[in-house]
Amino acid sequence: MAFEEWLWGQARVTVKHYHSDNGVFDSTLFREACEEENQKQSFSGVGAQHQNAEAERAIQTVMYMARTFMIHAALQWGSDGSDDLLLWPFAVDHAAWLYNRIPQQKSGITPIELVTNIKSDHRDLMGTHVWRCPVYVLDP
C-alpha cells in the first residue's frame, strides 16, 4: 500500500496494527492484504468515535482548516473562480500538509517528527503562501 511504502521510506517503520472504523478497512481485499503482511486489525464500534478519538479529532481539524481556506479564498478572490467546489480536494490536501508540519501546542513536535524521529527546521513552512491566493511568475 502507498501509505506503508511512504512510512517505510520516511522512517523505516512497518505497520503492525490498524485500528479503524468499519468502512473501507473492513473490505475483504484490505483484510487479505493485512493477513499477508501479518498485520492485526481492530475496529471501533458503530457510532463510537470516542474509540478512535485522536484520529477523529485530527480529521475534524483538517476539515475545518480546508473549509476555512475555501471561505477565505471565496471572500478575497471570488471573482477569479477561487470559490469553485472542485478545489475542495486541493484544500484538504493543503490542510493535511500543514497539519502534519505545524508543531502541536502541548509538545511542540509535529506529527511528521513523531513518525520519522527527525527534528524539523520548519523551512518548508517558510515557503508556504495563503492557499489559493493569486501568484505571479516573473521572468528574469
Image (cartoon, rainbow, N blue to C red):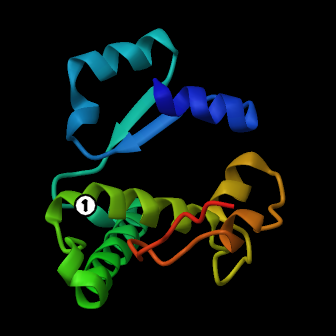
Between 38 and 4, the residue placed more toward the observer is 4
In the rendered structure, the answer to whether residue 65 lies left or right of residue 49 reads right
- Above or below, comparing residue 53 to residue 20 in the picture: below
Image quadrant where residue 58 sits = bottom left
Q: Residue drawn at (69%, 61%), measured in percent from left and top?
A: 140
Rendered location of residue 69, percent (x, y): 35, 77
What residue is pinned by disc 1? 87
Image quadrant where residue 22 sits = top left
For the view shown, which residue lies furthest in the front direction?
140
Between 35 and 89, the residue placed more toward the observer is 89
Rendered location of residue 43, percent (x, y): 31, 42
Q: Residues within 10 Å of mark 1 (few under 14, many from 20)?
A: few
Give the secondary structure at mark 1.
Answer: helix
Rendered location of residue 55, percent (x, y): 42, 60
Rendered location of residue 95, percent (x, y): 44, 66
In the rendered structure, the answer to whether residue 98 lies left or right of residue 92 reads right
Q: Can residue 26 be seen in this view?
A: yes
- Above or below, comparing residue 19 to residue 113 in the picture: above
In the rendered picture of this protein, how many numbered marks are placed on residues?
Answer: 1
What amino acid is found at the position of numbered circle 1 in the picture?
Leu
In the rendered structure, the answer to whether residue 35 lies left or right of residue 110 reads left
Q: Residue drawn at (51%, 14%), measured in percent from left and top?
A: 37
Q: Is residue 13 visible?
A: no
- Above or below, comparing residue 35 to residue 99 in the picture: above
Q: Residue drawn at (73%, 69%), measured in percent from left and top?
A: 109
In the rendered structure, the answer to whether residue 53 lies left or right of residue 120 reads left
For the view shown, which residue lies furthest in the bottom direction?
75
Between 138 and 114, the residue placed more toward the observer is 138
- Above or below, comparing residue 14 to residue 102 in the picture: above
